[in-house]
Image (cartoon, grey):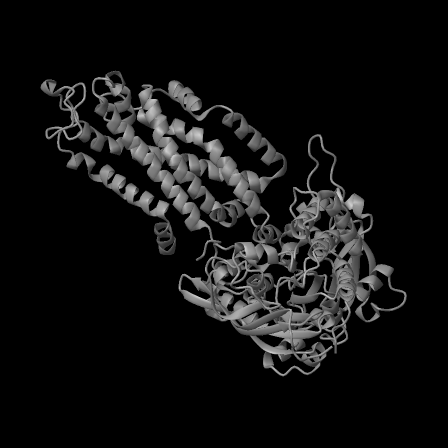
Amino acid sequence: MTDLLRRLLRTPQGAIGSALLVLLALLCLLGPELAPRDPEAIDFLGRFRPPGAQNWLGADQLGRDVLSRLMTGARSTIPLALLATLLGTLAGAVIGTLSAYLGGRWDEAIMRNVDAVMAIPGLLLALLLVSSLGKGSLNATLAIAIAFTPGMARVTRSVALNVRAQDYVKAALARGERASFIVLREMLPNVVGPVVVETTIRVAFAVMLFATLSFLGLGAQPPAPEWGLMVAEARRFVHQAPWIILAPALAIGVTAIAFNLLGDGLRDALNPRDER
Amino acid sequence: MTAAPPASPVLAIENYSLDYTLRHGTARVLDGVNLAIGKGEVVGLVGESGSGKSSLAWAIMRHLPRNAVEASGRLSLGGLDLRGLDAKGLQAVRGKRIGMVFQDPSTALNPTLRLGEQVIEVLMRHRGLGRAEARDAAEAALAEVELRNPTALMRRYPHEASGGEKQRVVIATAFATAPELILFDEPTTALDVITGARILELFARLRERTGVAALYISHDLGLVSRVADRVSVLRQGRIVEEGAPEAVFLDPRHDYTRRLVAAVPRPHRRLVDDAAGGDTVLAANGLSVRYGRRRLFRPPPPPATKAVSLEVRAGEILGVVGESGSGKSSLARGLTGLAEFDGGIHATGRRLDHARQMDKAYRRAVQIVFQHPDSSLNPRMRIGDILARPLKLYGGALSDIPALLEQVRLPADYARKYPHQLSGGEKQRVAIARAFAARPSLVICDEITAALDVSVQAQVVELLLALRRQHGTAYLFITHDLNLIRQIAHRIAVMQQGELVDLRDAAAIDAPDAHPYTRALIAASPAPVG
């Protein structure tokens, strides 16, 4: 594990991605405490105040400090995106591995269903689910997790098909092992590598999906300082006070890039052929 | 044939050393290698895996990995310093003055180009021919390597040709530019025994006709001693012995060579001298193995073996030989329930008509060891956990694990290690220990020594024989190495295209009434010199 970390940090993508993520993690943990002002304090005299000494990143249409809202909002944006991805990954990994293990008609049946779900664009599916489950952050998390599951199932299945052909799985079959043991103990640990990489890349999508849902008014509800919601609210004032929209948009972008870089770094670090 | 190095060599390697930079310092792969190949001479380079023989070939081709550091030495091709060449100079040498024939012809050819295109391109580039001329020359080159109907073959893609045909195309390409030197890197290892033997015959005729100098790299000392004029034995990057093949083979001076020679299987040196016991452990009656279930809209695949009937007696070693695709591994899969079968299996006092009927008693009694130790052990499990599985399934105490490891001559603390920390031979011993943890009455060995070096193969075979003496276990020993199986088997079954064509006592395998295919196999695997 420490070896993996060392190899990860040696690649430039891995190092930058990890550094950015450490910063974001700190923001999630300490953001609200470190925020210079109350993120929901309304100040009518300071409406649309440009960035300066009083409000470092400016103030929004209600005079709320953009920096404080950004720092507080990290906690309601990043962990939920991560949670949604992890849920989707776990479900997808188990379905994909099981499908590869069962093979034949079961594989066919599972994968055709997955294909059917995949035919619906992720955002559309999430919208559909949220509108039937009801608005709110937790429902949005669930919707994103479900939207991610078929993709993860496909990725995992393709890796698991290779693992299925390995002799240690055949040895377990010849030994008369139970299916649950073969799927969970023999196969799953060996598909983890590529799945982890895929997961980190998908976190970036999740952050943006979340922002999109909130932007459309289906995720977090005002006055929560969620980043996507901040972009949505600031949209009307983009000519008047571009800093209100730029700050959360940049934050979303940086988060997405950080997870993407980590994914790239992990892909290289997990590749055993690159041993030197 | 002379044992002395030539005076004006085609290729001269002087005091050549090569290092690889790794994470934890550097590793020396070649250490002060001296080698000279004269005009029309074939020098055999023998070494086990990791000895640096392929690194030497790539050093000559000037295609080394980025972390390679050439510590010292000279490489010269007829007076031309290879190390001093720039990219343009290299282009003029590679493929034109030095040809190369690789181990696996299916990866050496581009699968998206027709075979003819691949030869024509080489000829246009290196002999400066026009397209039409190159086409004629390519046809001539393919005829030269004794391919039937070269015109038709040139229109085919690599996947439409057999392994032997592809290797002939690779050889034709290497010879077509009339190079001074050709490097052969295990050119017959990936081929069937009979196809490989024909390639060797072709090589002998070609070198007689063209007088090309060649470096023939192989792990097989017996094989090299038949094709080479001189032999160099490489061990851990150093040449430990060189000389005429007869001298190296019959009177090896270095300890390592002696061990290597002793490990080469010789069909007439029997390692098993007792007779097999009486009771039948397992009998297959008209067993035909098939793969894949019937799918919607698709006809069921044809069976991989035709009806095969054979029986294994207690403590017997039954050899199964045949080329790849002859159905010998399918037989193993059928017997272990990894593939569907028709027909019946008699074992543990029952008759099984279907893989689903295999119960715990049958699975315990019939164990299998696979060919590739790298893939038969789960890389994410410790050796101790791997050995614990059969003990948990079939009964046995976890405290037996040290004894199991000791039985296959591995130290008990290996239980804490992961498979990647072990060598190939050690991994195969773990796989054997796992099979024996079930206290089986029959172990199916599916090409278990094919991926191992000769000396490791000898140790593994010796271990299997010791375990058999101890437990009275029977073996179904599947192999393509006829010389090896003649040393240990009581009876030998010969398979061809899914059919059991011959089944006879090992002593009578070369009898005149043997099946023609059996005789062809024997002819293709001659006993080594000495």
Residue A149 located left or right of residue B430: left
Tell me if B346 is positioned left or right of B5 in this view: right
The reply to whether residue A196 is visible in this rendering is yes
The answer to which of A184 and B122 lies nearer the viewer is B122
Residue A271, placed above or below residue A255: below
Classify B252 as above or below A198: below
B57 or A254: nearer the eye?
B57
Find residue B340 and report its horizontal and vertical position in percent.
70, 45
Q: Residue at x 46, y 53 (%)?
A: A274
How far across and how far down the image is residue A117, in percent? Answer: 50, 26
Residue B497 visible? The answer is: no
Residue sticking out furthest to the top: A236
Is residue A231 rendered to the left or right of residue B79? left
Q: Where is residue A184 in the image (x, y as percent from the top left)?
A: 49, 46
Left or right, B456 with reference to B174: left
Quadrant where the image shows the N terminus of chain B: bottom right
Q: Residue furthest right?
A: B513
Quarter of the figure with the C terminus of chain B = bottom right
* Depth order, front residue of A157/A174: A157
Residue occupying image coordinates x 33% and y 43% = A17
Residue plotted at (68% across, 75% down): B230
Q: In which quarter of the image is residue B518?
A: bottom right
The image shows residue B101 at horizontal and vertical percentages of: 66, 58
User: How many tags in the picture?
Assistant: 0
Question: Front-most of B206 and B190?
Answer: B206
Look at 52% across and 47% down and name the residue there: A187
Q: In this view, does A61 lie above or below B4?
A: above
